[in-house]
Image: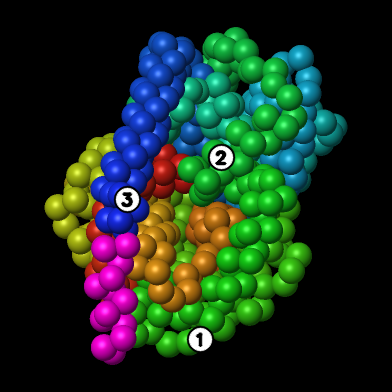
Amino acid sequence: MAIEDESIQCQPIQQDSNKYNPSDSNKETSNQADKSNKNESTNQIRKVHQESQNALPKWRLLLVSCTIYATQLSYAIATAYVIPIFYKLNMSMTFASMIWSISPVLCLIFQPKVAILSHGCHSRMGRRRPFVLIFAVGVIIGLIFIANGESIGRHAHTDNDYSHPWGIVFTALGVVLIDFSTDTCQIATRSYMLDVTPATQRQFAINLFAVVAGFGSCLAYMLSAIDWLYTLDDQIQVVFNIAIVMFVVCTGLTLISMKEQNTSANLSSNQEGHRSRNYSHNHSYQQLETDDKRADRKEGYQQGQGDIEQQHLIDDNGDDDDAESYDEITEQDLNDSQPITFYLILKSFLTMPRSLLLLCITQFFGWSAFVSYQLFFTQYVGQVIYIDNHNIDFNFNINQTYFKSGIQMGSWALFLHFISYSILAFLMKLIVNLIDIRIIYILSQFIFASAMTLIGCIATPSAVLILSALSGIHLAALISLPFMLVSNYQNLINAKNSERETLGGGKSFFIPQWRIDLFIAALTSLAYVAQFVICLIMGVIISTSGTYNAIIVVAAILAGISTVFSIILAVNVSPTCCNQSKDSDYFSPMYSGIR
């Protein structure tokens, strides 16, 4: 130690003899850093100024979003009348319910393929607008078939039987068409909106989507609730004709609102990849990176597999089970250029961290409860509350007036439900800043379960209206809070990795961006899975129990199960991950398709 101290003491003398001043080197380095920072800040200011000059007028963005409003309006009108129409055609509830389970399967299988086709489309209309037009035609045909399926079926066959099977076939085809086409048309329109919107306005476009979609649902249920004409058949014709006219006008406004930029395939791919990182819930996007970045990402991922300290949503002293699940990822899965397919979404449920799996289970039961409420509620109100006949068999012709009044009351209840949802979804970020996400999530599930239970017990029109309005927080939480949690999870991992790199020690727990995208796609797909499962079994449950009270009972039980899982999730989620961050805007309510 004495020798070392002596050498250290001699260094200043030697430096002084050579007239070397270390402060000069430090000043030079700091000057270079200042110049670099100034140049970087100048470039950022120029970029922001250039993007602000390219900003689109608000009215033009509103025109682009018109189709989103129209598709949501068409879907909501269908949900209000499809089950009563099937019942009017003497179709059993078992098969009437199963018709709704076809479209979710088609969406899960074909929507990723439609996204790939749209990405590679080079028509004169652009990449997105041809698909908006194609699926808009599907929506119009679906509306026509639902409203006129019985008449078309009678004209398609010489037999004039009132309940001819061809009428049921055309009506069922219309239900499948409108369910699949509205959702796929919304995705194409959303992609079109993000393609033509400058980066500085994308968050505004996202918020506009939320407002427009919620307004479409509210207007649809209000139109369904208004007493237009005396009979149910006339009521259906008026409402669906209004929907067709409004859909044609809105789609036309969207298609002529803006031209898509004709960029090269490489540039489009890079832009698409960038949007996938920012708006990754939409599995129609995919990330495309350079070979060097992909190689670095694979290397970093492989180095980070052994680090389980910075695990995921749970606390830092978590188990090794979730970290080991990453070892199941194959080399092919590490290829970021591949699209997110239905197979990869299914595989993600087997390999995702435990807390994310708990989140998915909670979401599944939450969506299942909401689907039970939305698709079958007008039938429940018309049958149980207004006709006061809980049994599945009743004379439709004798009780048609009361049944029609019940459908209108159910539509008013759904109208208030979506009004409540729209307000709370718009204020959700403010609410999250004031209250812990976990508490809001638990309360939203509990409120919905309590509302469904009270509706079943009280069963009066006033209770239906009040409790439906109060339960709107459930949908607002379903389509926003899970994506905020995943966003905060990703930000937490990145922050810990940056801290470790700054301190210069330890390996980083690396999670590829494509895997985060896969988690978001899996969360989004749960709405389809829930609709498939519920519509497959609801008719069987109603037929087996012999009463329409089963609708509200099933919704209450499923919401109760989701409440229990949300409590389990809250125990497993780290409080650090529940802190709201600025990047959570990327997972705002507008992204999830409002079923």
- Work out whether mark 3 precedes mark 2 in sequence or the reverse, and give the earlier one: 3
**Up-down: is 341 above or below 54?**
below
Mark 1 vs 2: CB contact within 8 A = no
Residue lying furthest front: 17
Q: Quadrant of residue 388?
A: bottom left
Q: Mark 3 and 1 residues: CB-CB less than 8 Å, in contact?
A: no
Counting from the top left corner in percent of width and height, residue 557 is at 37, 71
The N terminus is located in which quarter?
bottom left
The CA span between labels 3 and 2 is 49 Å
Q: Nearer the viewer, residue 272 or 154?
A: 272
State the extent of the magenta-drawn residues as a range: 1-14
Residue underneath mark 2: 274
Could you tell me what secondary structure mostly forms the magenta stretch?
helix
Instruction: Nearest to the eye among marks 3 and 2: give it.
Output: 3
Location of mark 3 (residue): 20
Circle 3: residue type: Tyr
Q: Residue at (69%, 46%) from the top-left corner?
A: 290
Q: Which residue carries the number 1 mark?
A: 321
Q: Does residue 22 lie above or below 127 as drawn?
A: below
Apparent side of residue 543 relative to residue 585 in the rendered image (left or right): right
At x 62%, y 13%, the residue is 259
Viewer-closest of 469 and 214 = 214
Q: Is residue 137 above or below residue 280?
A: above
Residue 41, given in percent of the width and then of the height, sits at 35, 29
